[in-house]
Image: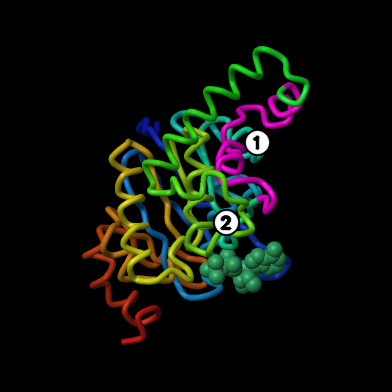
Amino acid sequence: DRRYERGISLNAASKHFGGVLAVNRVSLSLQEGEIHGLIGPNGSGKTTLLNLISGYYLIDQGAIELDDATLTQSSVQRRAALGVARTFQKPRLLGTLSGLDNAMLGGWKDARSGFMQNLLALPAARRQDAQLRARALEILHAMGLSHIVDKPASLLDHAEQRFLEIARALCMQPRFILLDEPAGGLTEHEIDQLANIVLAMRDAGIGVLIIEHHTDFVFRICDRVTALNLGSSIASGSAAEVRADPEVIRVYLGA
Ligand code: ADP
């Protein structure tokens, strides 16, 4: 009999692509109000693991749970509805839509019907639209993105696009957010801004999983870190523990 634990837990999850075992019996958990970093060299299975949690891929073996419910066979949409949001390595924004409209797209609980009803101008949809607009504006202001509210996404610079993707995920009012290399291509100053945003999300009670190459950033802000190599978890613990782990130093930090 298993101890009841809130949050997301992955138990001995495996995923292969043809002959490649991309994720090999990995267990990890993500609780609300914590930042969990996932590090490892290229090809170690980080993105696959994130895709297994978001439901983009289903696991071959093992189990994935949210609180006391199984997610093992649940769709991306079902997991999103339960509060699991994500961002992508390459921001996926609609270039002709404004920053505000892109952010609002994250908030439709039932994206298709909400959007359709809104086009048809049904009263309930108009109310939802007004609430969502207010929430999106609040999030953009809080993130220091007031200047992009009316700008088409195609005119935003790289950092603005990355932050807007996070704003869109936050508009979903998620319990958990999965960030795929959010610091990629950012300057040191922008990474500091990102760190403040991630810490604020944690303080708001959101559980944050971060895949990141930039290990200084991970060790600086994460409460817990898991290191992967060749699809397997080789170390997991506090940032200080993982940073000092001899196996991590050998395979990843190259010392
Ligand atoms: P990381 O994110 O750590 O760089 P990935 O999860 O992208 O690692 O990849 C882990 C392994 O799985 C690699 O060997 C990669 O080539 C393989 N892989 C990932 N996605 C696919 C896919 N869709 N089809 C085939 N192989 C894949």
- Between 55 and 140, the one lying in front of the other is 140
Q: CA distance from mark 1 to mark 2?
A: 16 Å
Mark 2 burial class by Cα count in 10 Å: few <14, some 14-19, many 20+: some
Amino acid type, callout 1: Gln
Q: Residue at x 54, y 52 (%)?
A: 87
Indicate left or right for 11 with 244 as reference.
right
Q: Secondary structure at mark 2?
A: loop
Is 205 rendered above or below residue 152? above
Is 32 rendered above or below residue 125? below
- Between 148 and 33, the one lying in front of the other is 148
Q: Quadrant of the N terminus?
A: top left
Amino acid type, callout 2: Phe
Task: Work out which residue is located at the far bottom of the displayed protein and give it.
Answer: 255
Q: Secondary structure at mark 1?
A: helix
Q: Is residue 140 visible?
A: yes
Indicate left or right for 37 with 223 as reference.
right
Q: Residue 147: x, y in percent?
A: 46, 49
Q: Residue at x 56, y 23 (%)?
A: 130
- Between 46 and 130, the one lying in front of the other is 130
Q: Quadrant of ligand 1?
A: bottom right
Quarter occupied by residue 161: bottom right
Is 153 rendered above or below residue 127? below
Please tell me whether mark 1 or mark 2 is closer to you in this view.
2
- Identify the mark nearer the N-term, 1 or 2: 1
Circle count = 2
Q: Residue 65: x, y in percent?
A: 50, 37
- Between 62 and 124, the one lying in front of the other is 124
Magenta-drawn segment:
94-117
Using the image, tell me which numbered label, if any, was put on residue 88. 2
Please name the residue that numbered disc 1 is placed on.
77
Q: Is residue 11 visible?
A: no
Using the image, tell me which numbered label, if any, was put on residue 165. none
